[in-house]
């Protein structure tokens, strides 16, 4: 064995040495621990799953970049798909870290070529690479799953950053990519997910809780009183957050301690509230005489969805979701829905392009009611109408409301956080734009349901009692589908 071969063998089995010698880096104690655990796991089993549950700022994206270069250097013809909650997050985080550490190594600069979408071996561009992968904004579960699909190689590593908000379909596809592992044949696979524990659902939560036996889990804390804390997290910042909000505050639990909150952090609705609402059912006879309300959330941009959400009293039916329709087409769909279902009130989001839908419906003599989510609320305790509608919707859910068993809706209802404005302590709901900055999708379905609580509605249409059935099964176009 030549000295070069001997050194490569050492690097392969000891990534802590590789990081120091090739990348000229000095890992923190927790980073050394993770590097050693991943190397030992893949050596023993040929497949390794690692979940990193972290506070803000400990250096997890840096660690992922080190793993990327280690695997890329020490395996033959590896493939390393990398993703994050958004394309911007991936390019500004993990991918930028990978570029930075390449500049520390003459070996890596001479051997590999970095671009905005791909890092490849200069002599084997098609078969030896790491790739930056994202999904289109507003993509459905199928399109999200395709993000990491189609990876076939003897040596595969999946790196998923900001996994606290990553869709289930993405990690499920990565899991499927582990199926080709064969220790005797020398085929290896590693799956690493890392993120802040912002949600009490999703892949990171499951890996750290009920699926923990399948994963190596590392909890990384910025707790100023923990001797094993991540030293890159400012101890002064951590103490200031604890002093300001308290140790039990959900925001502090997530961002300082790296712990899951009791429920979704600062959310109006917790996972248990929404989960119970999805399991409830009522017979039609129990709600047939209650008020019918239709909420219409209008897409502001091409990546969002327009949603028509019907609710009758205590029961929310399945929504109709529309993509890539203009205001005239959407108005036609709304009028058709009204003709078939005959709601007592129809509330349409009047912000942005929604005004065009309202105007067209009124021109066709349909009695729709415009609602500007940013306008003054009815109750002075809320900052605007959107916060007020969500507050009433949350009360309805907790008081026995029934919602469809729709994973997207359930996720959206628990996603936006709330706060209180510092000047007058009014309830403020997180905006769609701010949610997208956190890598979350626009809560179009939840906003449409919230619109059904825009104002009290008196029943104006007397309806004969229909056939008794089960809640949530309403389809306004079922006759056309036969």
Image (cartoon, rainbow, N blue to C red):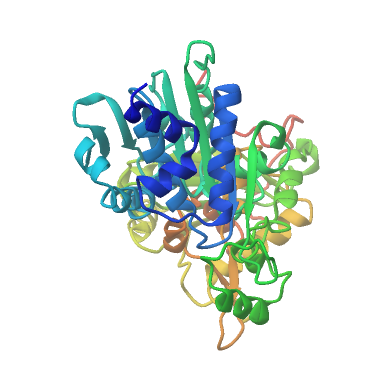
Which quadrant is home to the N terminus?
top left
**339 w.r.t. 123: above or below:** below
How many dots with numbers? 0
Q: Quadrant of residue 464?
A: top right
322 displayed left or right of 222: left
456 displayed left or right of 108: right
Q: Residue at x 25, y 51 (%)?
A: 103
40 displayed left or right of 100: right
Q: Nearer the viewer, residue 204 or 469?
A: 204
**59 w.r.t. 98: above or below:** below
61 displayed left or right of 378: left
| Image spot of residue 409 (x, y percent) | 58, 45
Residue 342 visible at all: no
Q: Residue at x 68, y 65 (%)?
A: 227
**226 w.r.t. 368: above or below:** below
| Image spot of residue 33 (x, y percent) | 59, 47
| Image spot of residue 465 (x, y percent) | 74, 37
| Image spot of residue 448 (x, y percent) | 53, 52
Q: Nearer the viewer, residue 321 or 10?
A: 10
Q: Furthest residue to the top?
A: 185
Q: Residue at x 73, y 42 (%)?
A: 288
Q: Residue at x 45, y 43 (%)?
A: 17
Residue 105 visible at all: yes
């Amino acid at each position: 064995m030549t000295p070069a071969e001997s050194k490569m063998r050492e690097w392969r089995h000891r990534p802590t040495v590789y990081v120091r010698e090739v990348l000229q880096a000095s890992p923190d104690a927790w980073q050394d621990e993770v590097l050693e655990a991943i190397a030992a796991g893949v050596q023993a089993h040929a497949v390794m799953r690692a979940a990193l549950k972290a506070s803000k700022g400990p250096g997890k994206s840096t660690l992922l970049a080190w793993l990327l270069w280690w695997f890329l250097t020490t395996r033959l013809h590896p493939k390393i798909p990398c993703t994050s909650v958004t394309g911007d997050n991936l390019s500004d985080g993990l991918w930028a870290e990978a570029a930075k550490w390449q500049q520390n190594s003459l070996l890596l600069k001479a051997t590999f070529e970095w671009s905005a979408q791909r890092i490849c071996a200069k002599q084997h561009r098609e078969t030896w690479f790491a790739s930056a992968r994202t999904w289109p904004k507003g993509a459905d579960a199928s399109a999200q799953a395709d993000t990491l699909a189609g990876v076939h190689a003897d040596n595969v590593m999946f790196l998923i950053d900001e996994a606290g908000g990553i869709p289930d379909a993405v990690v499920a596809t990565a899991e499927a990519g582990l199926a080709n592992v064969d220790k005797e044949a020398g085929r290896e696979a590693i799956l690493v997910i890392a993120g802040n524990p912002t949600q009490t659902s999703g892949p990171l939560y499951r890996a750290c809780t009920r699926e923990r036996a399948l994963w190596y889990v590392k909890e990384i804390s910025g707790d100023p009183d923990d001797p094993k804390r991540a030293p890159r997290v400012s101890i002064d910042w951590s103490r200031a957050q604890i002093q300001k909000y308290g140790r039990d505050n959900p925001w502090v639990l997530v961002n300082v301690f790296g712990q899951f909150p009791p429920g979704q952090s600062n959310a109006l609705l917790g996972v248990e509230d929404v989960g119970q609402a999805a399991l409830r059912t009522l017979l039609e006879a129990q709600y047939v005489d209650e008020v019918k309300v239709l909420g219409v959330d209008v897409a502001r941009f091409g990546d969002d969805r327009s949603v028509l959400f019907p609710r009758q009293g205590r029961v929310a039916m399945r929504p109709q979701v529309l993509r890539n329709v203009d205001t005239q087409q959407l108005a036609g769909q709304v009028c058709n829905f009204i003709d078939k279902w005959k709601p007592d009130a129809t509330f349409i989001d009047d912000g942005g392009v929604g005004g065009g839908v309202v105007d067209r419906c009124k021109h066709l003599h349909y009695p729709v009611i415009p609602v500007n989510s940013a306008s003054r609320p009815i109750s002075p305790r809320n900052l605007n109408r959107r916060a007020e509608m969500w507050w009433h919707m949350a009360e309805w859910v907790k008081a026995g409301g029934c919602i469809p068993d729709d994973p997207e809706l359930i996720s959206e209802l628990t996603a936006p956080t709330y706060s209180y404005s510092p000047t007058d302590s009014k309830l403020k709901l997180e905006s769609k734009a701010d949610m997208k900055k956190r890598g979350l999708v626009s809560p179009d379905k939840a906003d449409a349901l919230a619109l059904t609580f825009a104002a009290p509605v008196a029943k104006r249409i007397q309806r004969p009692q229909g056939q008794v059935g089960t809640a949530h099964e309403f389809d306004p176009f079922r006759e056309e589908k036969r």
